Amino acid sequence: MAKSWATLGVDLHLEPSGPGLRAGLTHTLREAVRGGRLAPGTRLPSSRGLAADLGIARNTVAEAYADLVAEGWLTARQGSGTRVAARAVPRPEAAPALPTAPAGPVHDLRPGFPDLAAFPRTAWLKAARKALTHAPNEAFGYSDPRGRPELRAALAAYLPRARGVHADPERLVICAGFAHALVLLDEVLRARGVREVATESYGVADHRRILERGGLATRPLPFDRLGTDPGPLDERNPGAALLTTAHQFPMGDPLSPDRRAAVLDWARRTGGLILEDDYDGEFRYDRQPVGALQGLDPERVVYLGTVSKSLAPGLRLGWMVLPRPLADAVAAARGTRDWACGTPDQLTLAEFLDSGAYDRQVRAMRLRYRRRRDQLVAALAAHAPRVRPRGIAAGLHAVLELPPGTEQSVLRSAAWHGLAVSGLRAYRHPAATGETPDALVVGYGTPPDHAWQGALQALCRAVG
């Protein structure tokens, strides 16, 4: 029966009997060295040890070793045992080189990303050191599926003053970003009998796909010059509506006061839920901040926020502020499905909020992004006056309206100039009605400061 050489992890496939045993062992060892399975310098088992592993006579192993030493494959020295000789091992023939892929974009102007080079590493490290130093031992075990109480308390203090959210720790559930929140809400909504979620005509396709993969249909609400029209909600009675009320993504307009009131009236009359995506609520420039819709009716609105724009998406930290009856159900869903948010980062963010470092970072980045926004508008006015930016009073992106019929050609031009940008059509719901204007959705948050002017010049050449 074949035995394996467990000591070296190499299968020799030897039959431990017969007149060819020595020759078979010699050949197998030679091929293991030749093929690189036994690397130069590898110490082989003693002849006694290998004989015991293989169940053969010790003399057979000693003679095979001696043959290979004579051929130069092995070396044998007193006190250092038998080793593979230090010789060049032939390498497998290289595969033919495949054509290299084209170089990637020089400048990333896709929307939805902050300037990652501006992440406050020193301040974050300081907060992490303090948070971990004072963390109780139990924090590193399995904790409340709602999230660490320190972070929920810090958010319950921050969100009311910064976004007008009615929050208390028992309403809060910590999650690993917006997509994770949608996965949890999808499960809870289906358990409540919801089968359809109304969405905006323009939005993030991945968010719609998450809902649809979970079993919820999505149908778009109309979009006009006043923004998203909630009128059809009464006719469809979808059970829930996903909206970016403070800064529609990507078009950039806030939901008007009349339409905010209409959405809330629908939810109160029908028992529907509003899922409010407040993805960039901290960044407002030319107008007063639009408070969260949740503050007007905490029992009908699920408020969703993250640090993906204010700090970095790689932290994978977000939160839901939920109606009281829903908070327990979402926490239960999170507790049975995953433990996605690490305790150290939760504790660090809590300290970052409590110390004021988060407010300082947001203020600094608000000034930086506003400066970039102003430079973008000025550059377009000077070099591409036919391109009109919209949705620029807030956020980290602008919609650049193009002459009719030019979106695809401008996208090709942008790629030629080394730009990663998005066309507006990529954000349109497949079932949306009406015409889609030709436009680019340009994020001005991503490039680091040293690359911003180059990105701006390339953009103007592409659209001008």
Image (cartoon, grey):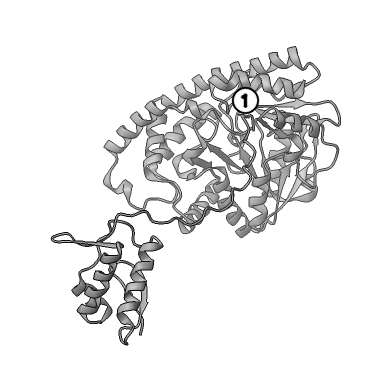
Number of numbered discs overlaid on the protein picture: 1
| Residue positioned 52% across, 54% down in the render | 329
Question: Toward which corner of the image does residue 387 lie, by quadrant?
Answer: top right
Q: Residues within 10 Å of mark 1 (few under 14, many from 20)?
A: many
Left or right, residue 256 beside residue 343: right
Up-down relation of residue 40 to residue 430 (above or below): below
Expressed as whole percent of the image width and height from the top left, the position of residue 361 reads 47, 24
Between 432 and 234, the one lying in front of the other is 432
Q: Residue furthest left?
A: 79
Question: Toward which corner of the image does residue 187 lie, by quadrant?
Answer: bottom right
Up-down relation of residue 317 to residue 21 (above or below): above
Q: Residue furthest front?
A: 70
| Residue positioned 78% across, 26% down in the render | 401
Expressed as whole percent of the image width and height from the top left, the position of residue 147 reads 43, 46
Query: Which residue, given by chain and number where applicable, does mark 1 sit on?
Result: 444
Left or right, residue 399 beside residue 164: right
Up-down relation of residue 223 to residue 89 (above or below): above
Query: Residue 366: in sight, yes or no?
Result: no
Mark 1: amino acid: Tyr
Between 328 and 213, the one lying in front of the other is 213
| Residue positioned 62% across, 35% down in the render | 104
Left or right, residue 331 beside residue 404: left
Q: Identify the image quadrant of the C terminus.
A: top right
Q: Secondary structure at mark 1?
A: loop
Q: Residue furthest bottom?
A: 18
Q: Identify the image quadrant of the N terminus.
A: bottom left
Query: Residue 304: in sight, yes or no?
Result: yes
Expressed as whole percent of the image width and height from the top left, the position of residue 269 reads 71, 46
| Residue positioned 36% across, 72% down in the render | 28
Between 134 and 188, the one lying in front of the other is 134
Expressed as whole percent of the image width and height from the top left, the position of residue 111 reads 64, 32
